[in-house]
Image (cartoon, rainbow, N blue to C red):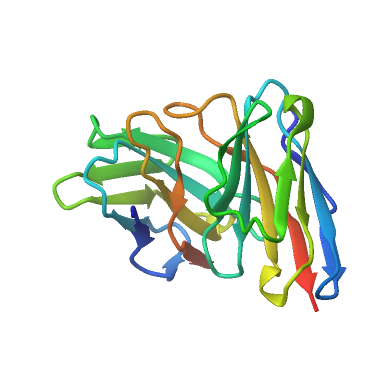
Amino acid sequence: EAGVAQSPRYKIIEKRQSVAFWCNPISGHATLYWYQQILGQGPKLLIQFQNNGVVDDSQLPKDRFSAERLKGVDSTLKIQPAKLEDSAVYLCASSLATGYNSPLHFGNGTRLTVT
Amino acid sequence: GESVGLHLPTLSVQEGDNSIINCAYSNSASDYFIWYKQESGKGPQFIIDIRSNMDKRQGQRVTVLLNKTVKHLSLQIAATQPGDSAVYFCAGPIIQGAQKLVFGQGTRLTINP
């Protein structure tokens, strides 16, 4: 089973620039998540999709972050404009369903550095 | 809101010894927890999970213990190996099947030869 694919692996931008991350979940997984992981901390949920609908985006800074999951498969996360505090690893995860016995499978993340 | 936290940010053990990583949670309605392992440069990897109707669950070299009375769970790794070096996260709660994971801060496990 192929895992969750993310690109790019690394990205360095200047503050106020824009950036986009891409995620391809495990085939057949209906639920997709974007997490932000700041150095030394646990992952924090930004947004959760069920198929192509948003389930939870309560912690997404909507003034600068946006995400979409067209056709219920791939997803992109965008930041515009970036701030220094956005420097983090952005993790995409997918699961077959939500709830019990459906653990998250994570990609290896995109490490973003904002200078 | 709910919180899930780990007791120690770092843990150092000798190769071959057993490791115990602890985690506390705040919501007594929590009924499902997951332990993840994160190696450097990689995403978190599922290790083992446990539902609140269980006190203990065993996997390959790992055991999770759940104490609902004090809202505490632990991950025990038997005969720790160099490949066990990683950051370990407990994640929860999941209440009534809703997938709303909150991750703790993580414990970095270091194996001494």
Q: Is residue A108 visible?
A: no
Q: Residue furthest bottom?
A: A115
How many numbered callouts?
A: 0
Relative to B31, residue B25 above or below = below
Across and down, in percent, residue B103 comes to 46, 53
Using residue B99 as the reference point, say whether residue A113 is left or right of it.
right
Using residue B57 as the reference point, say whether residue B91 is left or right of it.
right
In the image, A101 versus B1, the foreground residue is: B1
Relative to B73, residue B107 above or below = below
Across and down, in percent, residue A88 comes to 68, 65
User: Residue placed at 41% from the left, 42% from the top?
Assistant: B62
Relative to A1, residue B102 above or below = below
Across and down, in percent, residue B23 comes to 33, 56
Which corner quadrant of the image does residue B20 belong to?
Answer: bottom left
Using residue A3 as the reference point, say whether residue B95 is left or right of it.
left
Across and down, in percent, residue A59 comes to 54, 54
In the image, A31 versus A101, the foreground residue is: A31
In which quadrant will I find the N terminus of chain A?
top right
Which corner quadrant of the image does residue A110 belong to?
Answer: bottom right
User: Residue placed at 41% from the left, 50% from the top?
Assistant: B77
